[in-house]
Image (cartoon, grey):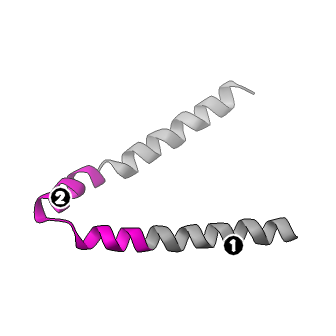
Amino acid sequence: MGNLLLILGALFIGLIIMIKIAEWQSRSQTEENRQSISKLSRWIFPLLALGFVIQIINHFMNQ
């Protein structure tokens, strides 16, 4: 039980740190950076879907 609480605490602290860094980075972005990020962000979900399909195929091929 103690290990679980330690892991959850570490994850919570890491999440808070990542949120603060993301907020800090978002304030320092220029319009050109925002356009570049929006162009790249349209590829995230298709790449995640492709990764899931590859993992499913890998799982069934190695059984």
Compare marks 2 and 1 and give the one earlier in the sequence.
1
Q: Which mark is residue 9?
A: 1
Q: Residue at x 71, y 25 (%)?
A: 62
Residue 32 image offset from top left, x and y in percent: 11, 59
Magenta-colored stretch includes residue 36: yes
Q: How many marks?
A: 2
Magenta-colored stretch includes residue 45: no
Q: In the image, which residues are magenta?
A: 20-41
Q: Residues within 10 Å of mark 1 (few under 14, many from 20)?
A: few
Q: Which mark is residue 60?
A: none
Badge nearest the viewer, 2 or 1: 1
Left of 14 or right of it: where is 5? right
Mark 1 element type: helix
Q: Residues within 10 Å of mark 2 (few under 14, many from 20)?
A: few
If the image is split into quadrants, where does the N terminus sit? bottom right
Which of the 4 image quadrants contains residue 38? bottom left
If the image is split into quadrants, where does the C terminus sit? top right
Residue 35 image offset from top left, x and y in percent: 15, 58
Amino acid under disc 1: Gly
Left of 60 or right of it: where is 40? left
Q: Residue at x 67, y 33 (%)?
A: 59
Q: Nearer the viewer, residue 3 or 46?
A: 3
User: Measured along the vertical axis of the image, is residue 50 above or below residue 63?
Assistant: below
Which of the 4 image quadrants contains residue 9? bottom right
Please give the residue where the numbered disc 2 appears in the rendered image: 33
Mark 2 element type: helix
Q: Residue at x 17, y 58 (%)?
A: 33
Amino acid under disc 2: Asn
Residue 37 image offset from top left, x and y in percent: 24, 56
Classified by dominant secondary structure, the portion drawn in magenta counts as helix
Residue 34 image offset from top left, x and y in percent: 19, 62
